[in-house]
Amino acid sequence: MSTLGLIGLAAVVLIAIALVLWANGDKQDEASADPEAVIAFARTVAEQVSSETVVGYLLATADREPSAEDINRTTSAPIGVTDARWPRVGGKKMAHAITLDVSQMPEVAEVLSPGTVAVALFLSDLWYHEAYEPLSPDAAVLELTAEDLATGENLDTPEPVEEDPPLTTKATTFTAHRIDLPKGLFERDFFGESNTDLVDKLESMVLRFGIAGARPLWIQGEEHDKPVILQFNEFLADMNFGDAGAFYVFQDTAFMQCH
């Protein structure tokens, strides 16, 4: 075979290998985005390391706008929030970031006030907030009852900060999936060096979702010692998370950490 022929054959082989790797990578991405695959992997990790587990809920975007009946919603008109209860900063209505239905999450609801069936987070602005630390005035958390939710959507939403071009936000709804997470995921030294790869893989899979309950997966270290209600990032909501950051929502405050 000529030199050119060998070069051509080598190129074909390299392309074939690249396509196989690409296909496998695509399958891994698909698996990572599948709640049931993550739930099964978390169970496997717990079994392999004989770890106790903590209950959480993976929050997976449904990639559609919320209907008037959807309680789980991001960056849309809030539900169950009248003008009288709408949080304000500087006299201006705050922007609705996310509402979480906790009515089917007893492990989350138990740390909230009696009668609470949903929790809503508001920010001074979805893109230009400064909610960088606990108790920031740029974030407000509301507990909602069934009676509150019965009032329906409040479409009188505030105008965003003016920019040219304006920053747009895609509103979505999401679904919740119960998951038993190994406690060691939140206490990294629990696993020891031999299980580092398992922990890293599980963490990367879990972080493709929002997480209700369980414990915070801190980016910059612990900043609040109350039970967490919700942790979410850009995979769930279209808003400002800084550099690959996340929001942590508690009963009394919410704030962002980023890299």
Image (tube, grey):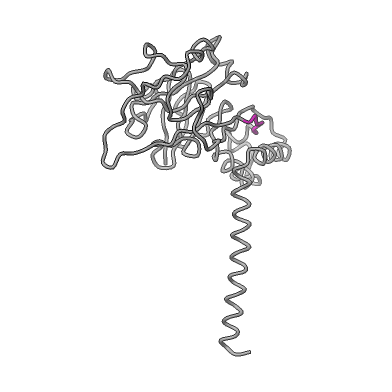
Q: Is residue 56 visible?
A: yes
Residue nearest the viewer, comparing 128 with 248: 128
Q: What main secondary structure does the magenta stretch of the protein show?
A: strand
At a point 44% along the width and 22% down the height, the residue shown is 78
Q: Say if the magenta span includes residue 15.
A: no
Q: Position of residue 239 (x, y in %)?
A: 40, 36
Q: Position of residue 165 (x, y in %)?
A: 28, 42
Q: Say if the magenta span includes residue 178.
A: yes
Q: Position of residue 90 (x, y in %)?
A: 27, 19
Q: Based on the displayed image, in which of its 4 quarters is residue 132 positioned?
A: top left
At a point 64% along the width and 33% down the height, the residue shown is 181
Q: Position of residue 203 (x, y in %)?
A: 58, 40
Residue nearest the viewer, comparing 80 with 59: 80
Residue nearest the viewer, comparing 193 with 131: 131
Q: Magenta residues?
A: 177-182
Q: Is residue 228 visible?
A: no
